[in-house]
Image (tube, grey):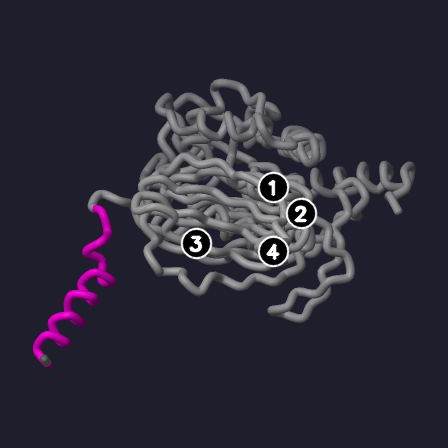
């Protein structure tokens, strides 16, 4: 009798412990979310790529279900890992539920409180799905921090106060490697610090994504930017080419209609293979790009023009112009954002310049002057128009 009971318990245990899990399925590695004034970002990290789409469901009062978004992850196992769900309660989302919908399919459900629109992005290295849910939640407070969630005005109606300075790469990601083993991550960090100082001299508040040699995911960079209340985002990078003669500076802003030669660079800066950049192009084509990119273009032009005009003397880089590029880090930030490639570390002259503190300081001053020029332009536009009531 006793032995039977033990046996039954063992059998039940074996069933629950994963004998029922079909082989060959992927795993959910992590689920994270962040609340911002006008949207909530959910990131589901997976151990493999999964194609999915977001489906919207109306509220079902009979079943006491609120309005929902859901997405199915085929070939993914979650089991009862998130059986209790994740409570969000930030005024937009009630919470996140994940469950095994069928033996070979996980369903992610977002229970909504308010909803305006959403966007979906699939990133790789590591594989993750990013869902941003937008909506207005005036007068609400963040229930975790108790801080009021002020409604975020459209960029053109906000004065520019805080600039986020993002030093590209870092930690285990050295970025490009140049002449004499010069690492992009070291150049970007030194320049970012000089840029921060130059921006402070122009009266800006400065927030850094990193101030030392550390690895940060692209979402972490934008999370830092958004949660610090950044008004502008400037990502600093150094370029590389197989052809050592290639040199010059170029500034990118995000646009779906990017030029073809931006693809290789975007692949490297996004940390993905070249052929995966096309996936981003398809995603971007479905998004409301018009909200931020005109401002990003103005900012890119102001910064590039100032760098080209202001850097004088012998160390004068060639002007490769303002360009469109599909960069994740620009897409993920919800504010006007540019990516500056400050020179080629694979070119002997520019590699030498970029190791010179005097040159980095001079370049930082010109970038800061470009940002100040953009601030002036936006203030003029602001004076001419009235913010919506
Ligand atoms: Zn880079």
Front-most of 199 and 131? 131
Q: What element carries label 1?
A: strand
Image quadrant in which you'd find residue 376: top right
Mark 1, mark 2: which one is toward the viewer?
Answer: 2
Q: Dots 3 and 4: beta carbons under 8 Å?
A: no
Residue highlighted by disc 3: 98
Q: In this view, does 145 lie above or below 90?
A: below
Q: Which of marks 3 and 2 is nearer the N terminus?
A: 3
Front-most of 119 and 347? 119
Question: Is residue 155 toward the left or the right of residue 134 in the image?
Answer: right
Q: Is mark 2 on a helix, strand or loop?
A: loop
Could you give the CA–CA distance between mark 4 and mark 1, rounded to whole angstroms? 12 Å
Front-most of 125 and 163? 125
Mark 3, mark 1: which one is toward the viewer?
Answer: 3
Residue highlighted by disc 4: 93
Q: Earlier in the sequence, mark 3 or mark 4?
A: 4
Could you give the CA–CA distance between mark 3 and mark 1, rounded to whole angstroms? 19 Å
Q: Give the range drawn in magenta.
A: 2-22
Residue sitting at the far bottom? 2
Q: What element carries label 4?
A: strand
Which disc number belongs to residue 118?
1
Could you give the CA–CA distance between mark 3 and mark 2, rounded to whole angstroms? 20 Å
Q: What element carries label 3?
A: strand
Which disc number belongs to residue 115?
2
Q: Dots 1 and 2: beta carbons under 8 Å?
A: yes
Question: Is residue 183 toward the left or the right of residue 113 in the image?
Answer: left
From the Cβ of disc 3, is ligand 1 less than 8 Å away? no
Q: Dots 3 and 2: beta carbons under 8 Å?
A: no
């Amino acid at each position: 009798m006793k032995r039977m009971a033990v046996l039954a318990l063992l059998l039940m245990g074996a069933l629950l412990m994963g004998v029922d899990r079909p082989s060959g399925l992927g795993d959910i590695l992590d689920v994270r979310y962040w609340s911002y004034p006008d949207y909530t970002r959910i990131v589901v990290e997976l151990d493999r790529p999964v194609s999915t789409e977001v489906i919207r469901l109306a509220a079902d009062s009979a079943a006491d279900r609120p309005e929902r978004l859901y997405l199915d992850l085929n070939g993914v196992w979650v089991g009862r890992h998130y059986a209790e769900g994740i409570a969000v309660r930030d005024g937009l989302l009630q919470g996140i539920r994940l469950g095994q919908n069928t033996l070979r399919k996980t369903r992610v459900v977002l229970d909504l409180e308010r909803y305006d629109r959403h966007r979906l992005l699939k990133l790789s290295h590591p594989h993750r799905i990013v869902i941003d849910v937008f909506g207005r939640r005036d007068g609400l407070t963040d229930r975790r921090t108790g801080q009021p969630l002020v409604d975020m005005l459209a960029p053109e109606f906000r004065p520019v106060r805080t600039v986020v300075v993002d030093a590209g790469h870092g930690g285990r990601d050295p970025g490009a490697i140049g002449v004499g083993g010069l690492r992009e991550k070291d150049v970007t960090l030194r320049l970012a610090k000089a840029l921060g100082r130059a921006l402070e001299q122009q009266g800006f508040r400065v927030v850094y994504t990193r101030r030392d040699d550390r690895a940060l995911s692209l979402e972490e960079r934008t999370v830092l930017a958004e949660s610090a209340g950044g008004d502008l985002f400037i990502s600093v990078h150094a370029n590389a080419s197989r052809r050592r003669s290639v040199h010059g500076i170029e500034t990118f802003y995000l646009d779906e209609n990017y030029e073809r030669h931006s693809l290789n660079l975007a692949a490297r800066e996004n940390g993905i293979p070249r052929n995966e950049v096309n996936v981003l192009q398809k995603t971007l084509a479905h998004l409301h790009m018009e909200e931020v990119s005109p401002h990003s273009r103005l900012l890119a032009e102001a910064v590039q023009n100032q760098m080209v005009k202001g850097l004088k003397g012998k160390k004068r880089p060639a002007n490769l112009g303002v360009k469109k590029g599909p960069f994740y880090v620009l897409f993920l930030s919800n504010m006007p954002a540019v990516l500056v490639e400050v020179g080629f570390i694979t070119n002997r002259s520019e590699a030498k310049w970029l190791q010179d503190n005097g040159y980095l300081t001079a370049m930082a001053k010109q970038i800061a002057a470009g940002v100040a020029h953009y601030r002036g332009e936006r203030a003029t536009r602001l004076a001419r128009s009235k913010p919506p009531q």
